[in-house]
Amino acid sequence: EKGGYASFMLKEIAEQPKAVADTLLGRVDGSGSLTLDEVRIPPELLRELDKVVIVACGTAFHAGLIAKYAIEHWTRIPCEVELASEFRYRDPILDQRTLVVAISQSGETMDTLMALRHAREQGSRVLAICNTNGSTIPRESDAVLYTYAGPEVAVASTKAFLTQLVACYLVALYLGQARGTKYGDEIRDVIRDLSRITGSVERVLETMEPVRELARSLAHHDTVLFLGRHVGYPVALEGALKLKELAYMHAEGFAAGELKHGPIALIEEDLPVVVVVPSPRGRSVLHDKIVSNIQEIRARGARTIVIAEEGDEAVVPYADHLIRVPATPTLLQPLVATVPLQVFACELATARGNEVDQPRNLAKSVTVE
Ligand code: M6R
C-alpha cells in the first residue's frame, strides 16, 4: 500500500501536488473566479462579521497562523488564531458576529471539538476545514470546506497541511470577495496563481535530493533552529514541529525579528539554522532584514541552511546550503517552502534510525483532551 515508497510519509509527501490540485478542483479557475458553494453561511452574515477566530492544534494550528496573514490582508477583518486546547479556558469573547474556523485533518481532535462546541454555545458560526468526510468536527459545524488530501496515514501531517493552507486561502479570498475589498484585482490575480500552484509544488519535489543529503549529514546534531518572517514564521514553526516529532531532536522555530531579543544567544559554532526567506519582490523590506539576520548568525559560526526563491541572489554569499523554491506570491509561499522541511525531517529521522510513520508516544488522531 506504500506504493513502492519506504514509508507512508514519503508517499504522502509525493502526493502533495495531487492533494493540492484536488482541493482546488472546481473551486478556482484560470480566469480568476472562485466558487465555494459548500460554505453555506449566508452572504449577509459574512458581510456583518467583525472577527474571525481560528482554532486548531499542532500542524493545523500552523495552517491557521498562516491563514491569519491572508484573512487580515484580503478582508481587513481582525483574525485571531488560538490553540484549541487553550481557547475555551480563557473565556474568549464570541458572539453572532464572530466566525470561528476549526481546522482539523482527522475531524476527531477532542481539543478542537471542545473549542467549537464552546463557540457555538456562545452563538458563533463555525466553519470546519476538514479532511475526513463525515467525521465529528464537520458534523457539529455550521458549514464545512473539505480538503481532498485523501487518507493520511503517517502520524506526521504533510499533504493534509498543504491542503489546509489551500482551504484557508480560499476562505480568505471568498470572504474578501463576499465583503468587497480594495484588493479586488489582487484577489483575482491570486486565484489565478493558486490555480497554477500545483506545478510549483511538483518542481520543489523534483529538486529534493540535496536536501536529503544535507539531512543525512546532520543526523548527529542535537539542535536545529528555524527562522522565518511574515508567513515564513509559521513555516519555521512547522519545520521545527516536524523535526521534533520525527527525529526527536531539539528544534525551535523563531520569528527572525525576535533573534536580537534573546534567541541569538543560542547561536554557536556549527549549529544548523534553517532560514525561510520571503520573496525579494513583494515585501522587500522584510527580505532585506532577513538577509541581515542570516549574516548575523553566520558571523557567529552557525551553519546556514537557506530556503529562498529562485533568482534571489542576495542570499547566495551567506548560505552554507541553499534550497531553491519557485517564485510565488508572498502569501502563497508556504505551499512551496514547507515541502523541503518535510523532506528534511523525514530523512533526518530515518538517518537516526527512527520509525517515521509511527513516531514514539504519538497517535494519528488525538481523541482525548
Ligand atoms: O487531525 P488534526 O488536524 O486535528 O490533528 C491536529 C494535530 O494533532 C496534528 O496536526 C499533529 O500535530 C501532527 N502529528 C503534526 O504532524
Image (cartoon, rainbow, N blue to C red):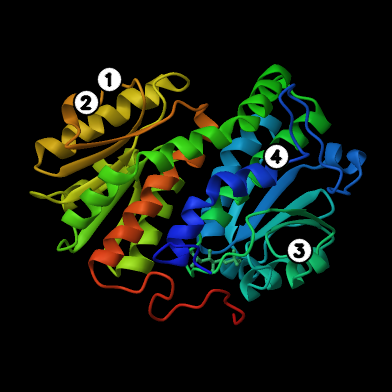
Is disc 4 surrounded by few (<14), some (14 to 19) or many (20+) residues within 10 Å?
Answer: many
Is the C-beta separation of discs 1 and 3 under 8 Å? no
Q: Is residue 154 above or below residue 262?
A: below
Task: Kindly identify the residue that appears in the image at 65 percent across and 31 percent down.
Answer: 195
Is disc 3 surrounded by few (<14), some (14 to 19) or many (20+) residues within 10 Å?
Answer: many
Residue 208, how many percent across, how many down? 34, 44
Q: Earlier in the sequence, mark 4 or mark 1?
A: 4
Task: For marks 3 and 4, give the CA distance.
Answer: 22 Å
Q: Amino acid at mark 4?
A: Leu
Check disc 1 and report its element: helix, strand or loop. Answer: loop
Task: For marks 3 and 2, give the CA distance.
Answer: 48 Å
Q: Earlier in the sequence, mark 3 or mark 4?
A: 3
Q: Which residue is mark 3?
A: 119
Q: Nearer the viewer, residue 173 or 92?
A: 173
Q: Which residue is mark 1?
A: 313
Residue 248 occupies quadrant: bottom left
Q: Amino acid at mark 3?
A: Ala
Answer yes or no: disc 2 within 8 Å of ligand 1: no
Task: For marks 1 and 2, give the CA distance.
Answer: 5 Å
User: Residue 170 — which label?
Assistant: 4
Q: Amino acid at mark 2?
A: Val
Q: Left or right of 136: which side holds 194?
A: left
Q: Nearer the viewer, residue 218 or 251?
A: 218
Q: Is residue 214 above or below residue 248?
A: above
Q: Which residue is mark 2?
A: 316
Check disc 2 and report its element: helix, strand or loop. Answer: helix
Closer to the camera: disc 3 or disc 4? 4
